[in-house]
Amino acid sequence: MAAVERSDGGGLKYDPDAAVAHLRAADSAVARVIDAVGPFTLRPRDGPYRMLARAVFFQQLAGPAARAIMNRVLAALETDEERFFTAQQFLAASDELLQPAGLSRQKIAYLRDLSEKFGSGHLGDGDFDGLDDEEVILRVTAVKGIGRWTAEMLLIFCLGRPDVLPVDDLGVRRGFMQVYGLAELPGGEEMRRLAEAWRPYRSVGTWYMWRSLGVTLPAQTIDPSLASTPPPAV
């Protein structure tokens, strides 16, 4: 995709109402989800450094445990979730300060690498606006401990990009399975096929796949081979 320009809409790089209208017209299965879930409420939050740092804390841990460790680190650095810590603050902290908070050596190394890249100016919170999605992923995954899934979450939830489809996300796969009546969790190729009609708003379709897991959808048989076909004009 081309470099993304800033727009209004609470930090989104697209019109959310236009995106929902497109999905509703393009895919009858997603239209059912929209009816059941309601309005699209995603708005970008945090800056890239903060979101990526939080992602490291939550890797391979249950949410409450990860949050407890993060809050202890924040307290040790004399910050909190509202102010968070800066790259410079983390780099100035010793292992002896961080490890008693429950942060593993590996995660300390990941957070130091992230902080060094932001602290040195190699990465910056305002650096991504002129890059396309794959360029953002390439730059972010150069940080130790940051993989493609985390980079895709950054694109959707922080940078407000419109057309991201995280095919490795278990929740999204479960959403596809439920919404399209699949017999098993789909792979990436099948998800891309089903979501082709969502373009250029696959991020919004992805959000509705996540949210579909928390609602009861009206009973309806969906043929996955036809689900992304726009309804005939009347």
Image (cartoon, rainbow, N blue to C red):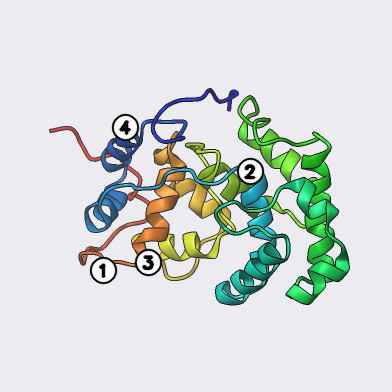
The secondary structure type at the circle numbered 4 is helix
Residue 12 location in percent, x, y? 45, 35
Q: CA distance from mark 3 to mark 2?
A: 27 Å
Amino acid type for the residue under numbered disc 4 = Ala
Residue 185 location in percent, x, y? 50, 67
Residue topped by disc 4: 18
The secondary structure type at the circle numbered 1 is loop
Q: CA distance from mark 1 to mark 4?
A: 25 Å
What residue is shown at x 73% (from left), y 54% (from top)?
A: 146
| Residue contact between numbered discs 1 and 4, judged by CB atoms under 8 Å | no
Q: Earlier in the sequence, mark 3 or mark 2?
A: 2
Left or right of 177: which side holds 231? left
Residue topped by disc 2: 48
Q: Earlier in the sequence, mark 2 or mark 4?
A: 4
Mark 3, other Cα within 10 Å: few <14 / some 14–19 / many ≥20 = some
Indicate which disc residue 216 carries: 1
Residue 230 location in percent, x, y? 29, 39
What residue is shown at x 57% (from left), y 58% (from top)?
A: 81
Q: CA distance from mark 1 to mark 3?
A: 8 Å
What residue is shown at x 56% (from left), y 75% (from top)?
A: 64
Residue topped by disc 3: 213
Amino acid type for the residue under numbered disc 2 = Pro
Q: Nearer the viewer, residue 232 or 20?
A: 20
The secondary structure type at the circle numbered 2 is helix
Amino acid type for the residue under numbered disc 3 = Leu
Q: CA distance from mark 1 to mark 2?
A: 34 Å
